[in-house]
Image (cartoon, rainbow, N blue to C red):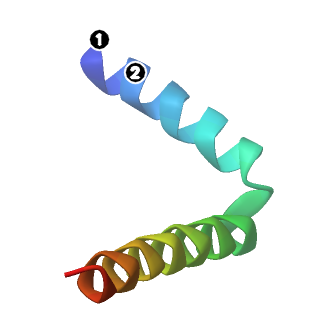
Amino acid sequence: MKAAVSLILAVLFLAGCNAMEGLGKDLQKGGSALEQAAQKDKASE
């Protein structure tokens, strides 16, 4: 049961990202946001 729910969620997630290319872009944007936040925090010290 848990495997079926996980599979459905994964499919919906990938469909929302317009396949794997979109997923890569989404992950890259998230990484960039984390990096910028870290740089701002470091600069304020």
The image quadrant that residue 23 belongs to is bottom right
Kind of residue indicated by mark 2? Ala
Label 2, label 1: how many angstroms apart (C-alpha)?
5 Å
Q: Residue at x 72, y 74 (%)?
A: 21
Residue 35 position, x and y percent, is 40, 82
Determine the secondary structure under disc 2: helix
Instruction: Report whether 26 appears left or right of 8.
Output: right
Q: Nearer the viewer, residue 23 or 31?
A: 31
Determine the secondary structure under disc 1: loop
Residue 22 position, x and y percent, is 73, 67
Instruction: Report whether 25 appears left or right of 8.
Output: right
Q: Residues within 10 Å of mark 1 (few under 14, many from 20)?
A: few
Residue 4 position, x and y percent, is 40, 21
The residue pinned by badge 2 equals 4
Up-down relation of residue 34 to residue 32 (above or below): above
**Residue 1, label in figure:** 1
Residue 1 position, x and y percent, is 29, 11
Q: Residue at x 53, y 69 (%)?
A: 27
Q: Residue at x 51, y 71 (%)?
A: 33
Up-down relation of residue 27 to residue 11 (above or below): below
Q: How many marks?
A: 2
Q: Residue at x 32, y 78 (%)?
A: 38
